[in-house]
Image: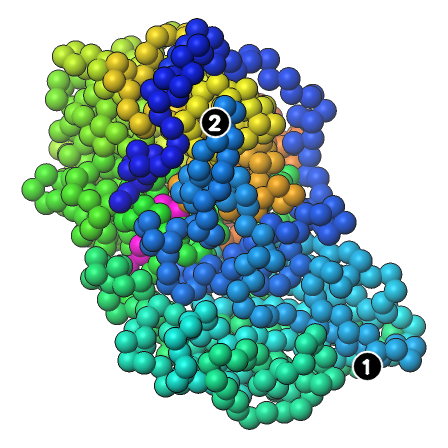
């Protein structure tokens, strides 16, 4: 069963039922079937708070002393390798690595149903309804496997043993910056302090090295005393193979030591496993390593609590009955001079290469396991690969983290706009042995890498573009492609029809993915199918007015009729992208056809679907407003197509003044700093924002029309009363691009505050289950804050910062490299600096946002590469930017710095 069926079958009561139970409310603001619009025009925003949103501020941190650690769960495994969280006190938890999530069988990170009072009645909330939002998962309840670290030190005649856990220290501070985090442990009476840094290798543009089923943990032990200290450091891990099985009396757990170059490891497996269970999702192996060949391996920890001194007896192997707890440890001794520190690194790997049986039944690509299973034989092989490449993997991961954080943008903003790419490092995504990328909408919920959900995300296409290109070629233009019509099935094997918004989104993503390529190869190889897919969109305009009007499925899980602004605009943006690609492919006839279609549709959309304040849904002439629709109400996605044009550097499709009016209407009618009064009176929505929290409601009826959503409004109406962060991020990104910077920052900040660690897990934005894919739209807000545009085949790169443009610095990615862009703007002009931190960059044209202090006259621009002057051939103004073209293509490499002065 997919997403559209859950509300229909859930215990979230429908309007008709509620109205029947409370008939008196039909005359008041609490009317179940006709509630009055009650979002205040005055948002009541404190000017000082608003001003603070622009400030660099402090790094994000969560503290024991503020009771902020219990919900922390940062994904700390590789992409598509299950979900392993690091908690606020540095211990690993959840361990959703056993391939057991699947639609309606086990969904979300914690498959539980909770009760929630929606303001008038108590309803049941399942994982896909938002149970983890109402009652967030608590790390201590879901540790699953025994894992941790302990430090033993003899100081002033006393032996101190402290585990790296919250209860053992006066203060524990968790500082995240996905994909890395730092945990600091301190106590007033201890002579040592500890800093733990954790991550799985994460290297933009390198999906393979970012997809290891492994986490690395790096300890720094600091001697705060005035004397040398003798310290033992122990790291331990449980054999978690076939964890929680009850019927394995004949099975043996086995642990053995295995050497690594300059390191030592313990390998965990199970022996004598019944043949039928060898193909089960929990069959596999695990391992732990210490990057010290002299580490002492204890293969069966016998005393609890942990005593590092007792773990200094070496074992070669251990085999125990399955019912016994098998925990192995690796311990090292370090002498630490007064006032100095030492570092010890560990890594933990897992290997569970049997996808859920239902996935294998449904998806041919899943039948032979996962992509990492084609690279490694078991968990030890994963560790060996990491050990051989650790220097490069660690340095490059940390270089990205440093590059990302070396910015003038606010810490909170950097954190919230990037954090959602962590969904790729959860059980929400897979990469099968064939190489195919595949995903749920949210963990275990709504199958098929749904086109109308995944199209909102901007992060994966910019950070790991090869995964998006894989999705285009293997699924969208492969398995899901209908060659007779050009339609693309929106859930591949799990559906049999296209969704119109998903179809348009694929075209736009293809254009973005082409731009994130180094040349035209990707476009040319796929042009014939892509052209059919674009034509499919044009064919859905039955009356020929340039506005899609064929009733089709959309992301709100209903078939709407008429001409709907957000669908019309999205289709126009897609066809415009199609025309741009046709030009690059040399298909002049199709380029002309697309241009004519867009021009006609653009004019008609601005004329026919704008009501003077915002864009609307024009009913079908025959059926009218019989079925569900947004009609004259204020819908969150109404200018979504125009929003996409900023993500791919295209010309506008909607009049700017009308677009700004529409965005201001969304701010006026849909945004509130406290959703409480609205959700109390507008029921049937899922709880993704609660009383006291800010948000932008999906759809509102500011005119208080009767039956505003159709004569026969169906169960999908509940969506209209929700705050879904993916849609909110899309609007925030658009507002940023259009210059509504304050509104964009406020909207992004209230989402950030909803996911503060004191309230729930900051790393898990929830919609239809956990780590919802649509939330990756947040990266689009960062891109628009930078005014970033890139076209790899054209070797074009541009920046036009919208925030703090006087002194700006931020990270960027291109087809083959990444680095930082920096600018300083003053009365004497603008100085830009482009640096390459990793990979390479081919560049012919570079552009920056126009400034009144910048001249485009000859001789007003000077450029140098690594201090060597360069000749600039052309300076021109294009689309609000000033651009320079180089006489010859620049081939920049790691460490290079391009400096341009505009006077």
> Is 112 or 202 nearer to us in this picture?
112
Q: Is residue 340 left or right of residue 694?
A: right
Task: Please name the residue shown 58% across and 36% down the image.
Answer: 754
Disc 1 crowd rating (10 Å Cα; few below 14, some 14-19, many 20+) is some
> Is 354 or 639 nearer to us in this picture?
354
Q: How far apart are marks 2 and 1 (CA)?
A: 61 Å
Task: Report helix, strand or loop for mark 1.
Answer: strand
Does 218 appear above or below 714?
Answer: below
Q: In this view, does 886 lie to the left or right of 119?
A: left
Task: Report helix, strand or loop for mark 2.
Answer: loop
> Is 425 or 100 nearer to us in this picture?
100
Q: Nearer the viewer, mark 2 or mark 1?
A: 2
Q: Position of residue 30 (x, y in %)?
A: 47, 14
Q: Position of residue 366 (x, y in %)?
A: 26, 63
Task: Please name the residue shown 36% across and 17% down the image.
Answer: 20
Q: Quadrant of residue 718?
A: top left
Instruction: Say which mark, if any, is on residue 593.
Output: none
Disc 2 crowd rating (10 Å Cα; few below 14, some 14-19, many 20+) is few
- Residues shaded magenta: 436-442
- Outermost residue to the left: 484
Query: Which residue is identified by label 2?
Result: 121
Does 419 appear above or below 643?
Answer: below
Q: In the rendered structure, which disc, 2 or 1, sits on the residue that comes first in sequence?
A: 2
Query: Which residue is identified by label 1?
Result: 230
Placement of the C terminus among the 4 image quadrants: top right
Q: Is residue 706 left or right of residue 217?
A: left
Q: Position of residue 324 (x, y in %)?
A: 52, 80
């Amino acid at each position: 069963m997919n997403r559209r069926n859950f509300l229909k079958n859930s215990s979230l009561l429908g309007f008709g039922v509620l109205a029947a139970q409370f008939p008196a409310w039909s005359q008041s603001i609490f009317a179940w079937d006709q509630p009055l619009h009650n979002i205040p025009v005055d948002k009541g925003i404190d000017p000082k708070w608003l001003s603070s949103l622009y400030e660099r501020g402090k790094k994000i941190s969560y503290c024991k002393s503020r009771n902020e650690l219990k919900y922390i769960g940062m994904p700390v495994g590789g992409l598509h390798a299950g979900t392993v969280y690091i908690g606020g006190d540095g211990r690993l938890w959840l361990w959703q690595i056993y391939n057991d999530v699947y639609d309606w069988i086990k969904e979300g990170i914690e498959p539980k149903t909770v009760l929630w009072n929606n303001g008038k009645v108590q309803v049941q909330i399942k994982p896909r309804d938002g149970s983890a939002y109402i009652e967030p998962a608590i790390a201590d309840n879901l540790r699953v496997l025994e894992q941790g670290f302990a430090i033993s030190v003899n100081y002033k005649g006393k032996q101190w043993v402290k585990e790296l856990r919250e209860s053992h220290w006066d203060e524990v501070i968790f500082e995240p910056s996905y994909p890395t985090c730092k945990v600091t442990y301190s106590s007033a009476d201890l002579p040592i302090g500890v800093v733990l840094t954790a991550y799985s290798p994460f290297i933009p543009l390198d999906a393979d090295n970012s997809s290891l089923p492994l986490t690395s943990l790096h300890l720094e032990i600091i001697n705060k005393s005035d004397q040398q200290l003798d310290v033992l450091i122990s790291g331990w891990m449980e054999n978690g193979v076939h964890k929680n099985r009850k019927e394995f009396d004949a099975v043996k757990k086995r642990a053995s030591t295995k050497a690594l170059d300059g390191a030592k490891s313990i390998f965990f497996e199970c022996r004598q496993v019944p043949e039928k269970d060898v193909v089960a999702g929990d069959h596999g192996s695990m391992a732990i390593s210490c990057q010290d060949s002299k580490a002492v391996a204890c293969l069966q920890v016998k005393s609890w609590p942990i005593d590092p001194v007792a773990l200094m007896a070496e074992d070669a192997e251990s085999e125990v009955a399955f019912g016994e707890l098998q925990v192995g440890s690796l311990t090292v001794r370090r002498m630490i001079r007064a006032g100095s520190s030492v570092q010890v690194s560990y890594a933990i790997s897992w290997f569970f290469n049997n996808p859920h049986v239902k996935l294998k039944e449904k998806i041919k690509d899943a039948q032979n396991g996962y992509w990492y299973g084609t690279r490694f034989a078991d968990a030890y092989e994963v560790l060996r690969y990491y050990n051989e490449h650790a220097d490069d993997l660690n340095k490059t991961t940390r270089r990205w983290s440093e590059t990302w954080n070396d910015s003038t943008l606010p810490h909170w903003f950097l954190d919230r706009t990037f954090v959602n790419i962590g969904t790729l490092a959860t059980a929400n995504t897979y990469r099968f042995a064939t190489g195919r990328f595949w995903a749920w909408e949210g963990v275990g919920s709504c199958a098929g890498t749904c086109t109308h959900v995944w199209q909102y995300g901007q992060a994966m296409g910019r950070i790991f573009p090869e995964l998006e290109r894989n999705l285009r070629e293997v699924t969208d233009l492969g398995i899901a492609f209908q060659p007779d019509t050009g339609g693309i099935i929106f859930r591949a094997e799990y559906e049999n029809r296209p969704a119109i918004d998903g179809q348009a989104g694929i075209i736009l993503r293809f254009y973005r993915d082409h731009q994130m390529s180094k040349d035209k190869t990707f476009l040319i190889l796929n042009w014939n199918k892509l052209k059919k897919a674009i034509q499919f969109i044009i064919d859905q305009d039955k009356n020929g007015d340039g506005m899609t009007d064929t009733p089709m499925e959309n992301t709100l899980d209903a078939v709407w009729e008429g001409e709907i602004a957000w669908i019309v605009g999205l289709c126009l943006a897609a066809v415009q992208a199609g025309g741009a690609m046709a030009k690059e492919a040399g298909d002049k006839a199709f380029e002309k056809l697309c241009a004519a279609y867009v021009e006609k549709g653009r004019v008609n959309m601005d004329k026919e679907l704008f009501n003077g304040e915002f864009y609307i849904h024009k009913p079908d002439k025959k059926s009218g407003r019989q079925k569900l629709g947004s009609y004259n109400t204020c819908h969150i996605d109404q200018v979504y197509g125009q929003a996409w044009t900023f993500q791919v550097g295209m010309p506008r499709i909607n009049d700017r003044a009308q677009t700004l009016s529409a965005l201001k209407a969304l701010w006026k009618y849909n945004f509130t700093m406290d959703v409480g009064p609205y959700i109390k009176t507008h029921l049937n929505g899922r709880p993704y924002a609660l009383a006291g929290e800010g948000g932008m409601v999906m759809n509102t009826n500011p005119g208080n029309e009767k039956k505003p959503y159709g004569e026969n409004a169906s169960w999908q109406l509940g969506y209209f009363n929700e705050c879904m962060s993916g849609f909110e991020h899309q609007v925030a990104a658009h507002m940023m691009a259009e210059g509504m910077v304050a509104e964009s920052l406020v909207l992004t900040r209230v989402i950030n505050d909803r996911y503060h660690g004191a309230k729930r897990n900051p790393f898990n934005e929830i919609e239809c289950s956990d780590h919802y894919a649509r939330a990756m739209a947040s990266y689009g807000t960062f891109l628009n804050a930078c005014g970033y545009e890139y076209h790899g085949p054209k070797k074009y790169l541009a920046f036009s910062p919208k925030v703090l443009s006087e002194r700006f610095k931020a990270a960027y990615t291109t087809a083959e490299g990444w680095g930082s862009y920096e600018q300083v703007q003053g009365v004497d002009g603008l100085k830009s600096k482009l640096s390459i931190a990793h990979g390479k960059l081919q560049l012919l044209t570079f552009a920056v946002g126009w400034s009144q202090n910048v001249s485009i006259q000859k001789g007003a621009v000077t450029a140098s590469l690594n201090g060597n002057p360069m000749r600039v051939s052309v300076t021109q103004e294009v689309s609000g930017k000033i651009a320079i073209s180089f006489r010859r293509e620049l081939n920049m490499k790691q460490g290079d710095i391009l400096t341009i002065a505009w006077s």
